[in-house]
Image (spheres, grey):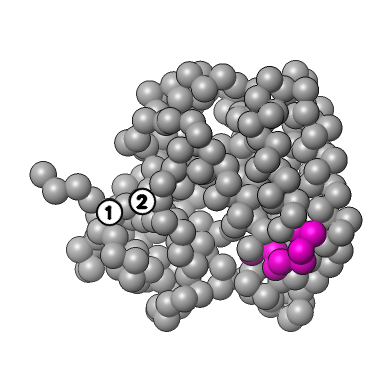
Amino acid sequence: MLSRRTCAIHQPNLFPRLPTLAKLYAADVWVVLDDVQFNARDYQQRSWLEHPNSARGQWLTLPVHRPRGRHSLISDVRLADPVTSARRVRQLVHQYYGRCRRWPELRPLIEEAAAATYAGNGLAAVSELSTRLLLEHMGWRGTVIRSSAFTVRPERSERLADLTVAVGADEYLCGTGGAKYLNEAAFTAQGIRVRYAQVPALAALRERRQTSGLWWLAAVDWEGLHGLLWSEGVGCRRSWTPR
């Protein structure tokens, strides 16, 4: 049986949640959906940091400038105060996870993300980098491509199907949110298989459904996290070899 090339499509998120990381990790290609409208209430510019040993937490938010107001695309959004934002990335993440046993492994990733923030890169670039760093830390060796590089149809499902074909994939990995609106016919028409990522029904994951994946990488041992995702089945097919 020939192996499939799997594509996941997701907006750039700042240090994303565990289900998002798991979905992207299960794909061969991550298409960064950067040419859609920016949503300040989503996770594109913010990440929920939670203390490893309690429910205390707060948002790490990067203030942004939207050149076209509410109609600005993610790719157009700029950081409003790169210097202050970089300092907050370093200080807040260290405040929450600096005492964790795995902090020495995470610190270089945070420093790299903070440096990109300080350099004044656009929000999409910073959030994309923060996600890619965590994925690579987990052993991911996939490809990252931005949706703005392609011309596709504007309808939601048709856009996703066209992007899947454009990156040479024959399987689309759909998250739990996308399952609510996805029209599989748009994929079937192009010979694309749709697979749905399933999130384990575990109390710890429900309680921290908005928490950054940093919590898990800092507070949960490798075997425990591997068992949570790849044995209990977030729709993933790979084993996890941490970097």
Circle 1: element type:
loop
Report the side of 148 relative to 117 (left or right).
left
Report the side of 209 relative to 95 (left or right).
left
Q: Check whether the beta carbons of the residues at disc 1 and disc 2 lie within 8 A of each other.
A: yes
Q: Circle 1 sits on which residue?
A: 5
Q: Circle 2 sits on which residue?
A: 28
Q: In which quarter of the image is residue 161?
A: bottom left
Circle 2: element type:
loop
Q: In which quarter of the image is residue 157?
A: bottom left
Counting labels gives 2
Frontmost residue, 132 versus 195: 132
CA–CA distance between discs 1 and 2? 6 Å
Tell me residue 87's x, y (percent).
86, 49
Tell me residue 73's x, y (percent).
64, 74
Q: In this view, does 20 lie above or below 29?
A: above
Residue appearing at x 38%, y 68% in the figure: 163
In this view, the residue farthest toward the left is: 1
Tell me residue 191's x, y (percent).
20, 63
Q: In this view, does 201 lie above or below 18?
A: above
Instruction: Rate crowding at label 1 as few (under 14), some (14 to 19) or many (20 or more) other CA atoms within 10 Å.
Output: some
Look at the image and give the residue range highlighted in magenta. Answer: 117-124
Decide whether residue 161 is among the magenta residues: no
Q: Quadrant of residue 109?
A: top right
- Amino acid type shown at disc 1: Arg
Frontmost residue, 184 versus 5: 5
Instruction: Rate crowding at label 2 as few (under 14), some (14 to 19) or many (20 or more) other CA atoms within 10 Å.
Output: some
For marks 1 and 2 on the same chain, the one whose residue lies earlier in the sequence: 1
Residue appearing at x 32%, y 36% in the figure: 237
Q: Is residue 64 visible?
A: no
